[in-house]
Image: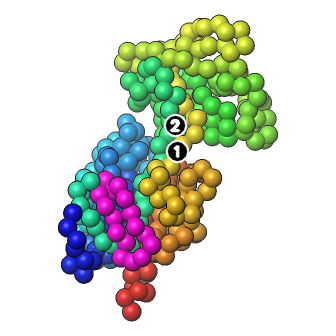
Amino acid sequence: MGEENSTDKEIINILILGSGPAGLSAAIYAARADLEPLVLTGLELGGQASLTNTIENYPGFPDGVGGNELGDLLRKQAERFGAKVEFDLATKLELNKNPFRITTDNKEILAKSLIIATGATPNHLNVSGEKELTGKGVSYCATCDGWFFKDRSVVVIGGGDSALEEALFLTRFAKSVYIIHRRDSFRASAILQKRVNDNPKIKLILNSVVQKINGTDKVESVSIKDLVSNEDSDFLIDGVFIFVGHSPNTDLFKGQLEMDDHGYIKTDLYMNTSVEGVFVAGEAADPNFKQVVTSAGMGAAAAIQATRYLEKIKG
């Protein structure tokens, strides 16, 4: 790359990293403010939401909307107002001075403000059948997919708050919910454990791990190992919900932005990060809600704050 000075390069107003609901909602708001934002999609357009077959809890779609379709609609809406969406991935950032310098797979960008919407990735079991049956009975979101398992039997894998909360949520639909956990006790809070123990639909399979998820076009069973007896067994089931944690996609920002112990970027109520002019939205900063609608709201808020920031530094 040549030795161009920053004065030789165009400096854009807002660069948005990530093209899920948070990033594209930010793009809509920034574009409507006539700031011509640039969105880098990352590895896939639409983020995690694009992996969901049908999203039924996003406002305005009474019959549900496909994850890919929603991402495409958000992109078109952002582009209609002047946002530019590029299939590119940021690989290096320099946030110690403004304009910020961002290196991608294809070029170098200078930006007056930055909105991080890189999301988070559900942790996987990494067992046979998991990848192949994702969306065909394997899910990482009970709120998204629980309705599809009305009067059916499902397993929930995990032992933290998320696993127990999602198991309780699934009892609204499923006839039976089995929680499989590798230990003999849960990490989850006492009140959640009490609710689980008091719910007649929930049964516990402790000291056990899932070694394989079986099925062709849909989940049919899971292969379980009892860690006490060392015995293997197959368990007939209709759905598998995996809640063994999320990992925020924030490695790129380590050492430059303040994060919590789990790698989520720290933010205040106004989407500000520890660096002025850098904002964050969606699951890169949200270990709690992890919903399409909350991510979209955070994206809108981040764009509004970025707009105010640009007005401030302009004059």
| 309 horizontally vs 32: left or right | right
Which residue is at the front of the view, 277 or 251? 251
- Where is 258 relative to 213, above or below? below
Residue furthest out toward the bottom: 315
Residue 74 visible here: no
Q: CA distance from mark 1 to mark 2?
A: 6 Å
Q: Quadrant of the N terminus?
A: bottom left
Question: In the rendering, at what x and y percent does residue 139 appear?
Answer: 48, 32
The magenta segment is 89-104
Q: Say which amino acid is labelled 2.
A: Asn
Which residue is at the front of the view, 203 or 259? 259
Q: Say which amino acid is labelled 1.
A: Ser
| 3 horizontally vs 116: left or right | left
Q: Secondary structure at mark 2?
A: loop
| 267 horizontally vs 19: left or right | right
Q: Secondary structure at mark 1?
A: strand
Q: Quadrant of the C terminus?
A: bottom left
Was residue 115 drawn as part of the magenta stretch in this picture?
A: no
Residue 11: image quadrant is bottom left
**Does label 1 or label 2 sit earlier along the sequence?**
2
Residue furthest out toward the front: 3
Tell me the number on the disc at residue 247.
1
Residue visible at 44% across and 55% down in the picture: 252
Give the residue number, with chain letter if any, for mark 2: 123
